[in-house]
Amino acid sequence: MRTWAILLTFVLALVTLFPACQGPAENLAEVTPVSVRDGVFVHISSGTAEPHRVLMGLRMARVMSSDKDVLVYFDIKGVEVVLKDSEGIAFGGFDSSKTQLQDLIDKGVTIYVCPTCLAAAGKTAEDLLEGVQIAEKDMFFSFTSGRILTLDY
């Protein structure tokens, strides 16, 4: 009997606290869903020796940025790609790395570089292309409010 009393108290509390639980189901239609954009995390660890990988990663970032939140992260050899003095990478029918990076920056896409990998390459933040930032841990989790898809190049 005590179990039933606890259960009844719980159900009454729910109905009191959540008015949407009261009345017919058509009342639920009045609730407007919040629009949430999903995010795409593009990880580029390849450098100038692997142009196809780099340019494909940048291409996917550009494509996805039309309707998704995008963050592009360069580490390991990828650091070579985002330096001021790096030569633009060209390959096949892809736009050059410099063109694609500038387009992403112009669209407001966040482009990060690993600070440890940058230091290992003997470079500093001053050596980066304008618009490329040193990675911040918290941004990996806050650049989007939706789900996160990761593409790795």
Image (tube, rainbow, N blue to C red):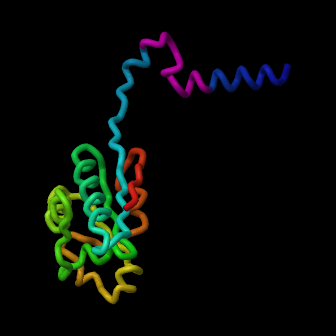
Question: Which image quadrant: the C terminus?
Answer: bottom left
Image quadrant of residue 71?
bottom left
Q: Residue at x 25, y 74 (%)?
A: 82
Q: Is residue 141 above or below residue 78?
A: above
Q: Residue at x 35, y 34 (%)?
A: 34
Q: What residue occupies the far right of the structure in this picture?
A: 1
Question: Which image quadrant: the N terminus?
Answer: top right
Q: Residue at x 64, y 21 (%)?
A: 12
Instruction: Describe residue 50's horizontal placement relative to residue 147 as left or right.
Output: left
Instruction: Describe residue 30's horizontal placement relative to residue 67 as left or right.
Output: right
Q: What residue occupies the far top of the structure in this picture?
A: 24
Q: Is residue 125 above or below residue 102?
A: below
- Indicate the position of residue 106 as horizontal and vertical percent values: 15, 60
- Indicate the position of residue 22 as horizontal and vertical percent values: 52, 16
Residues in magenta? 14-26
Magenta residues: mostly which secondary structure? helix
Q: Was residue 19 drawn as part of the magenta stretch in this picture?
A: yes
Q: Residue at x 42, y 67 (%)?
A: 137
- Indicate the position of residue 127 as horizontal and vertical percent values: 23, 83
42 or 143, which lies in front?
42
12 or 151, which lies in front?
151
Q: Was residue 60 drawn as part of the magenta stretch in this picture?
A: no
Q: What residue occupies the far front of the structure in this picture?
A: 92
